[in-house]
Image: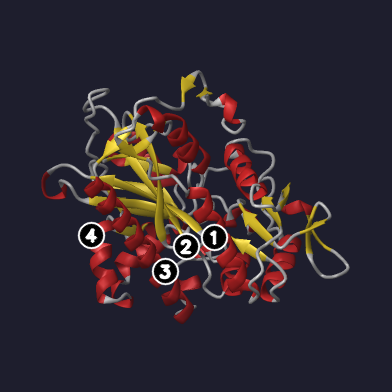
Amino acid sequence: MLYATGVLSDPWLGGKERFRLQPVLISQSQADQLRVAAERVGLIYHELSEIVVRHPELLDQFFNLTPWQKAMWLASEGRWHGIARVDLFICTNGAEDGRIRACEMNSDTPSGEAEAVLLNQLLHPFYPATIDPNEGFDERFWQMLVASHWARTGQDAEPESVAIVYPTDLPEDLSMIAIYKRWLEDRGCRITLGSPFNLGVDRQGRVTVLGEAVDLIIRHYKTDWWGERETIWTNQAPFPDPDPLSRELTLLLEAENEGRVTVVNPFGAVVTQNKFAMALMWERRELFSEQAGGWIAEYIPETRRLTAMGHEDLNRDEWVLKSDYGCEGDSVLCGPFIKPKDWQLALATAIPEHWIAQRFFEVAPIDDGLNAGAALPNYGVYLIGGRADGFYTRLSQKATSYTSVTAPTFIRR
């Protein structure tokens, strides 16, 4: 069934299943709580973006952005959002029991949409007493693109020619590229696939991808890859391609500024994707409104810049280390689940200007009769235009496992 979609071609990875047939079943009240939490986290980040607009000195003094990263943010004029995914966990243990925590929000290049939507579609007929929360995801995604295009160009015409720009040498997110292409072609769009190096401008000043003029670009190429690439470990070899994509960035930022093209997600995600954003929420709480401050305390684990903490403050059992733009296992170190010598080595070799420390929390294991007490659920809640619109649930056997199994997510009627 997965192969037959023509989108999900890798149901096994490294000899292990990526999906399971049994769904994660949540109650309507749980679904509502997760949606509310995700939307509130999105609002916190939006308020943060407005704070950085008012206090541009934070770009240097707090975020340590490179020149081209600052150019992306300043050119965006605060625009950062189209689609995002907030990763939520339900906690256990003592005072944290039942609390919802957001370990991060991927507002730059969120993925998993194909897996979330198609797995639910395939298996929902076998669970008729449930609601598929991802039904209609494609239409909501399209309406967000249309609204983004109107806001950027000032015209009420729908985009007709769309390009998806992504790292064409990496296969991980090809399913997402494929399903985006299908959704847009179903709505009459001409689709071009390419990388940043395929960008150009025609004689009429229109942005082109592989020579095809486009109205809108879906950007699935990370902001920190567009700018200068910096190492995060003192013992790390330099990147073979550390230079910014200055030609491509200049071309796009100028075209956006003049309303000749729309980019989703906007380049302002260079700030909201940076994990120092969560440190700002905790270290500079006075900059936020009273309401946002309450939501930060409720949903965001205590987060500090590594430069603001001494090694003696970082008890291995209490903290998780994360790099500023990292999204892979080698740049997330969960203290309670790694060896003491590895923790000390990480502290000794991490370049502090690129790292945060986040307070560890225990995740309540799922108890659904299948792997009772074993699977730890990560409820990824998508935000589309600020609204919670879909679930992408992954189950891991322990916090140190960066390979997880995707399960369909249904709501009990």
Kind of element beneath mark 1: helix
Q: Which amino acid does label 2 sit on?
A: Gly
Kind of element beneath mark 3: helix
Mark with earlier residue (2, 1): 1
Q: Is residue 57 left or right of residue 361?
A: right
Between circles 2 and 4, the one closer to the viewer is 2
Q: Which residue shows up at 41% across the image and 43% down it? A: 332
Mark with earlier residue (1, 4): 1
Q: State how far apart marks 3 and 2 are (Cα).
A: 11 Å
Q: State how far apart marks 3 and 4 are (Cα).
A: 17 Å
Q: Nearer the viewer, residue 268 or 409?
A: 409
Q: State how far apart marks 1 and 4 are (Cα).
A: 31 Å
- The residue labelled by disc 4 is 298
- The residue labelled by disc 2 is 385
Position of residue 70 relative to residue 408, above or below, is below
Between circles 3 and 1, the one closer to the viewer is 1
Between circles 3 and 2, the one closer to the viewer is 2
- The residue labelled by disc 3 is 46
Kind of element beneath mark 2: loop
Q: Residues within 10 Å of mark 1 (few under 14, many from 20)?
A: some
Q: Can residue 66 be seen in this view?
A: no
Q: Which amino acid does label 1 sit on?
A: Gln
Q: Which residue shows up at 56% across the image and 67% down it? A: 147
Q: State how far apart marks 2 and 1 are (Cα).
A: 9 Å
The image quadrant that residue 38 belongs to is: bottom left
Q: Residues within 10 Å of mark 4 (few under 14, many from 20)?
A: some
Q: Which residue shows up at 53% across the image and 26% down it? A: 2
